[in-house]
């Protein structure tokens, strides 16, 4: 009976992972629509279409958050700890790095403009690296 429970838990983990991947693709697609739709799919002077695309992106983003929470609940304790530790590092890097950039920019120490898209990219990359390092550490 224990083996059946472990198999069922594994199936739940796979299902929540697939759902998270699908929600991630949906969120990225709606983000691209909101970013590139004005000018490519509709006239950029039509704010209603642009606001609708942003609203859809926000709604799908909320769905992604729910899917991520379900994904975490579907993981075993070790995997959940790895992801939680990676999120801690990613949040710290994003928070400290972001504010360091703001302070350096305010003091005119930054000679170049950083695209706003780079701000969430840094913790995203750090999170992926931290998950890989965490998995290697638990082998």
Image (tube, helix red, strand yellow):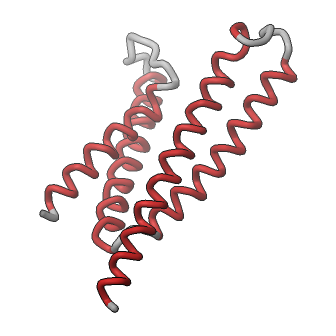
- Position of 68 compared to 37: left or right? left
Relative to 60, does residue 81 appear above or below in the rendering? below
Frontmost residue, 33 versus 119: 33
Quadrant occupied by the N terminus:
bottom left
Q: Residue furthest bottom?
A: 1
Relative to 133, does residue 116 appear above or below in the rendering? above
Relative to 136, does residue 10 appear above or below in the rendering? below
Relative to 72, does residue 117 appear above or below in the rendering? above
Give the x, y percent position of residue 111: 38, 11
Give the x, y percent position of residue 27: 59, 38
Q: Residue at x 39, y 34 (%)?
A: 100
Q: Residue at x 67, y 44 (%)?
A: 60
Q: Residue at x 58, y 53 (%)?
A: 65
Give the x, y percent position of residue 56: 74, 37
Frontmost residue, 15 versus 70: 15
Give the x, y percent position of residue 112: 41, 11
Quadrant occupied by the C terminus:
bottom left
Q: How many marks?
A: 0
């Amino acid at each position: 009976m224990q083996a059946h429970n472990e198999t069922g838990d594994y199936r739940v983990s796979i299902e929540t992972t697939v759902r998270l991947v699908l929600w991630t693709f949906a969120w990225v697609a709606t983000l691209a629509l909101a970013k590139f739709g004005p000018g490519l799919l509709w006239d950029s002077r039509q704010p209603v279409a642009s606001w609708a695309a942003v609203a859809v992106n926000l709604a799908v983003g909320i769905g992604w958050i729910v899917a991520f929470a379900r994904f975490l609940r579907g993981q075993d304790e070790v995997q959940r700890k790895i992801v939680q530790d990676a999120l801690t590092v990613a949040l710290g890097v994003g928070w400290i790095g972001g504010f360091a950039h703001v302070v350096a920019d305010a003091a005119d120490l930054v000679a170049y403009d950083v695209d706003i898209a780079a701000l969430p990219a840094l913790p995203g990359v750090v999170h992926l690296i931290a998950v890989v390092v965490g998995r290697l550490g638990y082998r």
